[in-house]
Image: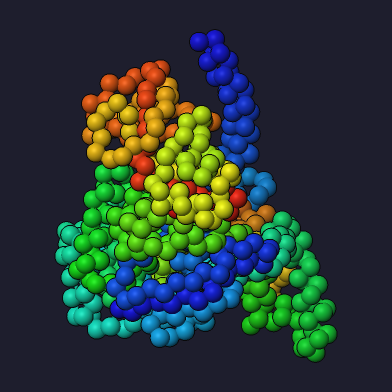
């Protein structure tokens, strides 16, 4: 296994479109890195550049200590799992997995050993003589993984490998991939647009938007300390609530309500010259409370809002309401008696308020 | 209910005239030809029933034997040549090259020209242009090389359609399969051998069968280029049936030849399909 180094990587197409802009990242050996972002953010393009399926317009890509910009895909010692699995439809499961080794002229006994070992790990032993068309979605996905495993590459690349599976299977396979990472001790780069996958699998997550890296951090830091409004909104479901508010030197005022801030946070805002200016206040739905219910945390002043949507999710309830011109959501306990049309009193956890600059959208305080 | 009846009536109004035309100009001649194959009909005058004599004589007639040998030789060589060249053309026209659509259109032009027209153009080339360049006698006048001229003309015209079929086959192979193959180390010949060819095998089958059938029935090109000469060395079965049946007073005998030839083509096509279907990957 090996680490990777991406230095000032750009992808420019002949028509002038820039899919990836100045991508910089050092990936350590055995890391599980996730590229996440909305469609068209450049995550798959970056992965394909690493795989050698797309040319790098400028910048340097190293796998281990070797610069591989101009090295062919097959010589980069990487394996890739594709979104549609890209299995060879005319070959059996066994041949699909053995193909790369066969081309390398590996002795048959070694190929057989590697394929059977991968099949054992992925529980594919019983379907080795079947063709991809005779397999279920989950089995195909595992064959695609097996094909990567038998090659024992330095780096595994996975391009949305779970997106074609149903919700239940996706959860199951997610756990399988996590186990596989532990077992193989492999360096994995994983592309997804699903933030749950990103949060549960990655040791570090790279959030991208419009070809630009927004933040590279651990899942916890991304969630608790997002760099900007985009990251704050992208990570977390339902997304963070954003309310335009005015900082008066001590509190944030929105919709006629003054929301208190901890002294040290207010001091930072003051120091940075935001007094009298409009900023964006961000609060995650789980930090919005029913102000009349008991709470262990320190709450802001309450405000009234009318419930527009009530969603029972089993263990919790999600409430949607409008406040200060923004559509907001709150996660409350299962016992909530609220109903659509009811007026309810909400308050925020004072310590969990994020503040973003309105112009630059960058985070000021967390 | 009423609209269903109307639909039925419209359907019958369209189908029946075509059926009558097909029956009158295809089925009736076919049946009559089969009947004449048991007679000594010369194409005119009276005739007698001769039973299976025409069929027995077919197997001892040297001219018929030669025409079968020539036709099979031509069909086999032309089919192989056409398929190899059209596959190469399809691979080239399916790659990322400039003016791809324009080139595809250009290469398809031979297919829209009539075989006789093409034959006469090539006849001019082989008779006047090539000898002027090479200072040698015309290929068409050589017993050794005339068949090759016919192969060239057949190939030139057939490659267009075969290429088109191969291009559509190549487009059915998903791009990510090629990408996976590239990562696995399959490039160049290995990619063609292990990925492309097995995946376009159904298209190869259809091309081989159609191409073989068309080449076995070669007629127009011979009519335009050699008229079976020199010294009957390029006499195909179809040409012999036409020539001796219509002009040679052997209508009954050549009808028997046509029946046998029909059976031969059907058998070859079925055998080809069976053999190639076994090779096709069940995707």
Is residue B23 visible from the viewing direction of this image? yes
Measured as percent of width and height from the top left, residue B182 is found at 44, 73
Residue lying at 45% horizontally and 49% vertically, measured from the top left? A266
- Above or below, comparing residue B233 to residue B178 in the picture: below
- Above or below, comparing residue B281 to residue A169 in the picture: below
| Furthest residue toward top | B2
Instruction: Describe residue B154's horizontal placement relative to residue A27 as left or right.
Output: right
Q: Decide which of A260, B280 is in the foreground and name it.
A: A260
Which quarter of the image is occupied by the C terminus of chain B? Answer: bottom left
Residue lying at 23% horizontally and 58% vertically, measured from the top left? A176
Instruction: Describe residue A197's horizontal placement relative to residue B85 as left or right.
Output: left
Measured as percent of width and height from the top left, residue B196 is found at 46, 67
| Furthest residue toward bottom | B135
Instruction: Describe residue A62's horizontal placement relative to residue A245 as left or right.
Output: left
Measured as percent of width and height from the top left, residue A192 is found at 40, 55
Quadrant of res A113: bottom left
Is residue B201 visible from the viewing direction of this image? no
Residue lying at 19% horizontally and 80% vertically, measured from the top left? A109
């Amino acid at each position: 296994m090996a680490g990777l180094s991406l230095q000032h990587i750009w992808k420019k197409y002949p028509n002038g479109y820039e899919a990836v802009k100045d991508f910089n990242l050092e990936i350590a050996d055995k890391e599980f890195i996730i590229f996440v972002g909305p469609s068209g953010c450049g995550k798959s393009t970056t992965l394909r550049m690493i795989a050698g399926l797309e040319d790098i317009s400028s910048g340097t890509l190293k796998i281990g200590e070797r610069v591989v910009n101009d090295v062919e895909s097959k010589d980069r010692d990487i394996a890739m799992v594709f979104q549609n699995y890209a299995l060879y439809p005319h070959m059996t499961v066994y041949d699909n997995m053995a193909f790369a080794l066969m081309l390398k002229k590996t002795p048959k006994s070694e190929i057989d050993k590697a394929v059977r070992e991968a099949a054992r790990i992925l529980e594919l032993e019983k379907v080795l003589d079947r063709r991809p068309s005779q397999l279920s979605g989950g089995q195909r996905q595992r064959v695609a993984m097996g094909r990567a495993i038998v090659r024992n590459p330095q780096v595994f690349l996975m391009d949305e490998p779970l997106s074609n599976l149903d919700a239940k299977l996706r959860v199951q396979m997610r756990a399988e991939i996590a186990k596989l990472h532990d077992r193989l001790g492999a360096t994995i780069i994983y592309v997804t647009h699903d933030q749950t996958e990103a949060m549960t699998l990655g040791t570090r997550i790279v959030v991208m938007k419009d070809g630009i890296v927004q933040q590279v951090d651990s899942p916890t830091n991304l969630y608790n300390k997002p760099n900007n409004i985009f990251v704050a909104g992208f990570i977390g479901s339902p997304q963070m609530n954003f309310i335009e508010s005015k900082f008066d030197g001590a509190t944030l005022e929105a919709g006629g309500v003054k929301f208190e801030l901890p002294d040290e946070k207010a001091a930072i805002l003051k120091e940075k010259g935001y007094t009298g200016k409009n900023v964006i206040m961000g609060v995650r739905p789980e930090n919005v409370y029913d102000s009349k219910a008991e709470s262990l945390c320190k709450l802001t002043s309450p405000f009234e809002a009318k419930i527009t949507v009530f969603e029972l999710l089993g263990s919790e309830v999600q409430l949607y309401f409008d406040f200060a011109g923004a559509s907001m959501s709150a996660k409350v306990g299962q016992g909530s008696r609220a109903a659509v049309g009811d007026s309810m009193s909400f308050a925020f956890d004072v310590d969990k308020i994020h503040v973003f600059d309105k112009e630059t959208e960058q985070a000021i305080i967390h | 209910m009423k609209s269903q009846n109307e639909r039925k009536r419209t359907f019958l109004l369209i189908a029946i005239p075509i059926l009558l035309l097909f029956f009158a100009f295809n089925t009736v001649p076919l049946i009559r030809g089969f009947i004449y194959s048991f007679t000594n009909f010369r194409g005119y005058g009276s005739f007698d029933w001769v039973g299976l004599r025409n069929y027995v004589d077919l197997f001892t007639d040297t001219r018929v034997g030669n025409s079968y040998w020539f036709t099979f030789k031509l069909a086999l060589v032309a089919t192989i040549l056409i398929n190899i060249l059209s596959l190469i053309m399809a691979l080239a026209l399916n790659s990322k090259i400039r003016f791809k659509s324009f080139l595809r259109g250009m290469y398809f032009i031979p297919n829209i020209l009539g075989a006789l027209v093409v034959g006469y153009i090539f006849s001019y080339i082989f008779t006047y242009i090539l000898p002027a360049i090479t200072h040698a006698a015309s290929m068409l006048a050589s017993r050794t090389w005339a068949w090759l001229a016919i192969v060239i003309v057949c190939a030139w015209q057939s490659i267009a359609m075969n290429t088109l079929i191969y291009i559509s086959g190549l487009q059915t192979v998903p791009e990510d399969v090629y990408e996976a193959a590239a990562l696995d180390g399959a490039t160049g010949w290995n990619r063609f051998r292990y990925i492309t060819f097995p995946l376009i095998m159904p298209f190869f089958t259809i091309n081989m069968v159609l191409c073989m059938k068309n080449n076995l029935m070669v007629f127009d090109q011979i009519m335009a280029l050699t008229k079976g000469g020199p010294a009957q060395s390029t006499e195909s079965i179809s040409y012999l049936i036409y020539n001796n049946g219509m002009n040679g007073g052997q209508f009954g005998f050549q009808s028997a030849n046509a029946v046998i030839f029909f059976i031969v083509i059907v058998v070859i096509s079925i055998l080809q399909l069976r053999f190639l279907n076994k090779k096709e990957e069940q995707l």
